[in-house]
Image (spheres, coloured by chain):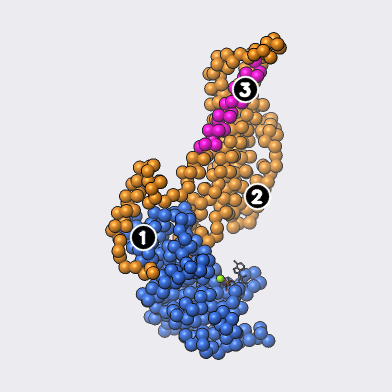
């Protein structure tokens, strides 16, 4: 019974997916019929998602439902078995079955346009704060050291950490590390920023400073996809809210989803966490 | 003194001081063998480690077999096998006693070092790779700028222990008639019958060599450790840190007071 319901949702998901033709101008990211397996574990079961420019998408759902995998598919840290990722009109990934093969973008080109912030920060511990933020500018964009450092310092100033440019990650609090990680991504001028539970590894008193940075980033009009358990924050910034369960998008909608959702599964999850 | 006289015996270290040139030649050869073998073994060990971690199953299996094989054979047995077995069976005139020894050390130590380097690379959390890839770095760049520096730091202490072991193990080639420190001592002792004095000097020399390496490794560990350039402590020491301190201060002044999205 449950399995049938899931299938039904998957099908609905793909029917609702807008067609590729005519897409472009306002669209920053589109996932098309993503199928992802880990061995025999069918983790993403034909997921489709459309993110408009400047939109803030919040993804929530129970543990193991595939939220991280979905997010990591957007920059192809996870390679799906089929489906495609469209960023700024260019298509990446293995493609949707049955469609004619078209020329696909290089994964590295995709990643240059997509910033990612991890739950565990993943700062480079052997590099100073400044070098953490400059390394991609220099090694990926080929920028001169002086210019890269100036840009990095400006970015670090925006997240309130200019005073820490000479420190190493191990000397910073979790909240400061996550802000450096945000600066490291932002300095590359991404078209989209992905956040995978950015505050879950933080002590409660440090959550606020990271959310504050994300809030101001949202106000600048940055396109964001945020996986979070902070339902209050999600409700605040989420233009599009996506509830996932067992590898499918069960329901998505505007802010009303938190008070007035269609699906029973969504309702019980929201009731449990709010 | 009394005890010695009672035995009609007294220590005479002039046998050592009169033959310092012999000892020096022995030490030089010992260090030559140890350093040459170790450098070659390190290079080969990196290759073995990378093969071991290769996505190609066959390459990985070959490296694993190499490691298991050479770690299993006693070093002395292997040295004798190379020199008396392989050299004569295949008529390899290239293998002089010295070269056979260095070859045997290189092969065996590369197996051990390969395991150390593999463990070092694997000890770097996967999130490091992912973070590097996510800012657009390629696989090779990710390895060389992000993974390798961290793996090197992790590998320094065990690698230092291997170097100390190498210096000591180099004495095994005395059995092939290589005039390194041990055989030099052995010949001198047999000639002068001053076994205690000559060997005591050699024990002392090995102690000095290994202790020196120990401190070298400690120094390298500290050298690779991280420190805040803007803190007082590091600034005092090196001109490099002072220089960097100045650059960061200038940068801060150039940027300071800009727009902030921080709380
Ligand atoms: N690298 C992997 N190898 C094998 N299975 C994996 C891997 N990563 C995730 N999975 C599995 O895929 C499923 C979805 O995992 P995912 O991490 O996307 O869930 P999630 O919704 O982010 O959960 P959480 O809220 O706990 O972070 C889980 O069943 C998980 O066990
Ligand atoms: Mg997750």
Considering the numbered disc 1 on the image, is that residue within a helix, a strand or a loop? helix
Give the image quarter of residue B103.
top right
Ligand 2 image-quadrant field:
bottom right
Are there few (<14), some (14-19), or many (20+) residues within 10 Å of tag 2? some
Tag shown at residue B204: none
Q: Which residue is mark 2?
A: B64
Colour in which chain A is drawn: blue
Does the rendering let one see residue A249?
Answer: no
Q: Position of residue B3 (x, y in %)?
A: 69, 14
Q: Nearer the viewer, residue A1 or A109?
A: A1
Q: Which residue is mark 3?
A: B200
Of all chains, the one bearing label 1 is: A
Q: Quadrant for the C terminus of chain A, please.
A: bottom right
Left or right: B249 as drawn, with respect to B66: left
| Numbered range of the magenta stretch | B194-216
Are there few (<14), some (14-19), or many (20+) residues within 10 Å of tag 1? many
Considering the numbered disc 2 on the image, is that residue within a helix, a strand or a loop? helix
Colour in which chain B is drawn: orange
The residue positioned 54% from the left and 18% from the top of the image is B20
Q: Would you say the beta carbon of the disc 2 residue lies within 8 angstroms of ligand 1?
A: no
Q: Are marks 3 and 1 on the same chain?
A: no
Q: Position of residue A243 (x, y in %)?
A: 54, 81
Instruction: Of the two numbered discs 3 and 2 on the same chain, state the one appearing first in sequence.
Output: 2
Spatial separation of the CA atoms under disc 3 and disc 1: 60 Å
Q: Would you say the beta carbon of the disc 3 residue lies within 8 angstroms of ligand 1?
A: no
The residue positioned 61% from the left and 32% from the top of the image is B168
Whether B215 is among the magenta residues is yes
Of all chains, the one bearing label 2 is: B
Front of the two marks 3 and 2: 3
Tag shown at residue A162: 1
Pointer 3 and pointer 1: residues touching (CB < 8 Å)? Answer: no
Give the image quarter of residue A272.
bottom right
């Amino acid at each position: 019974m449950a399995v049938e319901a899931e299938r039904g949702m998957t099908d609905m998901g793909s029917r609702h997916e807008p067609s590729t033709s005519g897409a472009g101008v306002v669209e920053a990211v589109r996932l098309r019929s993503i199928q992802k397996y880990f061995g025999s574990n069918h983790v993403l079961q034909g997921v489709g998602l459309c993110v408009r420019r400047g939109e803030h998408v919040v993804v929530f759902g129970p543990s193991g439902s595939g939220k991280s995998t979905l997010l990591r598919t957007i920059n192809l840290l996870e390679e799906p078995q089929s489906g495609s990722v469209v960023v700024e009109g260019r298509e990446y990934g293995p493609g949707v079955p049955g469609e004619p093969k078209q020329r696909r973008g290089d994964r590295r080109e995709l990643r240059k346009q997509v910033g990612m912030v991890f739950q565990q920060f993943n700062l480079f511990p052997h590099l100073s704060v400044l070098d953490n933020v400059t390394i991609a500018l220099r090694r990926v964009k080929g920028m001169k050291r002086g210019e890269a450092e100036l840009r990095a310092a400006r970015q670090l100033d925006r997240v309130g950490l200019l005073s820490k440019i000479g420190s190493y990650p191990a000397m910073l609090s979790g909240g400061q590390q996550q802000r450096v990680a945000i600066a490291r991504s932002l300095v590359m001028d991404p078209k989209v920023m992905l956040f995978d539970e950015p505050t879950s590894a933080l002590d409660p008193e440090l959550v606020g400073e990271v959310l504050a940075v994300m809030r101001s980033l949202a106000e600048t009009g940055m396109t964001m996809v945020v996986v979070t358990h902070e339902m209050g924050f999600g409700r605040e910034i989420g233009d599009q809210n996506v509830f996932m369960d067992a590898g499918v998008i069960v329901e998505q909608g505007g802010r009303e989803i938190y008070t007035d959702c269609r699906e029973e599964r969504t309702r019980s999850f929201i009731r449990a966490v709010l | 003194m009394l005890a010695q006289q009672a035995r009609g015996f007294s220590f005479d270290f002039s046998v050592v001081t009169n033959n310092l040139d012999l000892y020096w030649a022995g030490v030089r050869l010992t260090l030559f063998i140890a350093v040459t073998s170790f450098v070659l073994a390190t290079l080969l060990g990196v290759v073995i480690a990378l093969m071991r971690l290769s996505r190609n199953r066959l390459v990985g299996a070959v490296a694993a077999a190499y490691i298991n094989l050479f770690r299993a054979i006693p070093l002395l047995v292997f040295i004798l096998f190379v020199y008396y077995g392989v050299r004569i069976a295949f008529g390899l005139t290239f293998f002089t006693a010295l070269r056979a020894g260095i070859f045997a050390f290189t092969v065996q130590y590369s197996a051990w070092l390969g395991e150390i380097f593999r463990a070092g690379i694997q000890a770097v959390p996967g999130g490091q790779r992912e973070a590097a890839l996510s800012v657009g770095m390629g696989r090779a760049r990710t390895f060389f700028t992000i993974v390798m520096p961290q793996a090197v730091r992790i590998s320094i202490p065990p690698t230092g222990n291997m170097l100390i072991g190498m210096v000591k193990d180099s004495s095994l080639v005395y059995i092939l008639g290589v005039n390194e420190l041990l055989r030099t001592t052995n010949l001198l002792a047999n000639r002068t019958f001053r076994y205690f004095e000559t060997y005591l000097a050699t024990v002392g020399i090995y102690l000095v060599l290994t202790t020196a390496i120990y401190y070298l490794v400690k120094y390298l560990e500290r050298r690779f450790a991280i420190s805040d350039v803007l803190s007082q402590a590091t600034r005092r020491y090196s001109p490099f840190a002072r220089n960097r301190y100045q650059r960061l201060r200038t940068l801060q002044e150039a940027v300071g007071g800009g727009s902030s999205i921080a709380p």
